[in-house]
Image (tube, grey):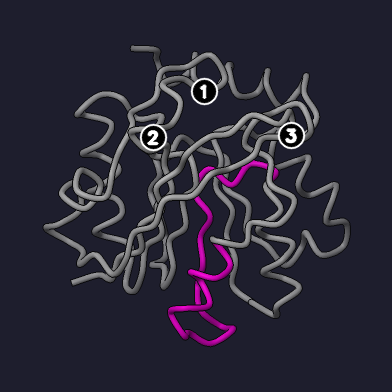
């Protein structure tokens, strides 16, 4: 298991040395995430946090759709810097948090917790239970989780990941959340390879 500081260094290096078209997780438009967020039917004042958001384009589209309370969390300060540069003056509308999710100590609760491809990097039971505990305490409404499926890759960015399917992902969160729906989806990477994801949406008990 790599330490938190090694993990941070790894991601700082990735975002320091690579452009969005050189990393597998880049999406031009994160349609599935946006559809799931809309499906909850919350107002534009809903508090949304994007876990492991890095320099993902999700925040751009949420701003465009008029959401007013957006937080982006990532272990890499460099990733957040890139996102801020891209957004220009709109970056001031967002709360930016540079921390490891397992060390996150929120000062507010969230109506929507979105995580595409961060949770699957937690490979020890201790990391997973910390994540679940933080999510249970600080989500008041809904959670979206997207991870590599059992048909997806076993590594990403040189690191081991934990694959999930609908059953194993739902079981992890069943004490605090009720599963709404799960789908699998093929993500085509910028280099034309296919990664199979499972996305589940949950409602807080």
- Report which quarter residue 128 is drawn in: top left
Q: Nearer the viewer, residue 96 or 188?
A: 188
Can residue 89 be found in the magenta stretch?
A: no
Task: Indicate which disc, 2 or 1, sits on the residue closer to the N terminus.
Answer: 2
Residue highlighted by disc 1: 156
Distance of label 3 from label 1 (alpha carbons): 14 Å
Residue highlighted by disc 2: 120
The structure residue drawn at horizontal position 39% and vertical position 57%, both measured from the top left corner, is 183
Quarter of the image with the C terminus in it: bottom left
Looking at the image, do the residues carrying marks 2 and 1 touch, with CB atoms under 8 Å apart? yes
From the viewer's perspective, is the residue at label 3 or at label 1 nearer? 3
Instruction: Give percent across and percent down for residue 131.
Output: 30, 43
Magenta stretch, residue numbers:
33-55
Task: Indicate which disc, 3 or 2, sits on the residue closer to the N terminus.
Answer: 2
Check disc 2: other Cα within 10 Å, few if <14, some if 14-19, many if 20+. many
The structure residue drawn at horizontal position 69% and vertical position 36%, both measured from the top left corner, is 79
Can residue 54 be found in the magenta stretch?
A: yes
């Amino acid at each position: 298991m790599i330490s938190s500081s090694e993990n941070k260094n790894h991601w700082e290096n990735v975002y320091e040395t690579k452009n969005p078209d050189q990393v597998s997780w880049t999406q031009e438009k994160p349609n599935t995430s946006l559809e799931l967020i809309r499906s909850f039917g919350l107002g534009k004042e809903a508090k949304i946090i994007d876990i492991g958001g890095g320099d993902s384009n999700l925040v751009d589209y949420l701003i465009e759709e008029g959401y007013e309370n957006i937080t982006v969390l990532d272990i890499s300060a460099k990733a957040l810097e890139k996102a801020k540069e891209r957004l220009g003056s709109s970056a001031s509308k967002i709360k930016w948090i540079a921390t490891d999710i397992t060390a996150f100590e929120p000062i507010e609760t969230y109506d929507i917790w979105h995580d595409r491809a961060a949770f699957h990097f937690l490979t020890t039971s201790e990391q997973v239970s910390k994540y679940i505990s933080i999510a249970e305490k600080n989500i008041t409404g809904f959670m979206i989780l997207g991870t590599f499926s059992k048909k997806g890759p076993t590594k990403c960015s040189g690191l081991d990941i934990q694959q999930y399917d609908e059953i194993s992902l739902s079981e992890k969160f069943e004490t605090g959340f009720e599963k709404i729906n799960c789908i699998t989806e093929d993500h085509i990477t910028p280099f034309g390879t296919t990664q199979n994801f499972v996305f589940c949406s949950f409602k807080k008990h």
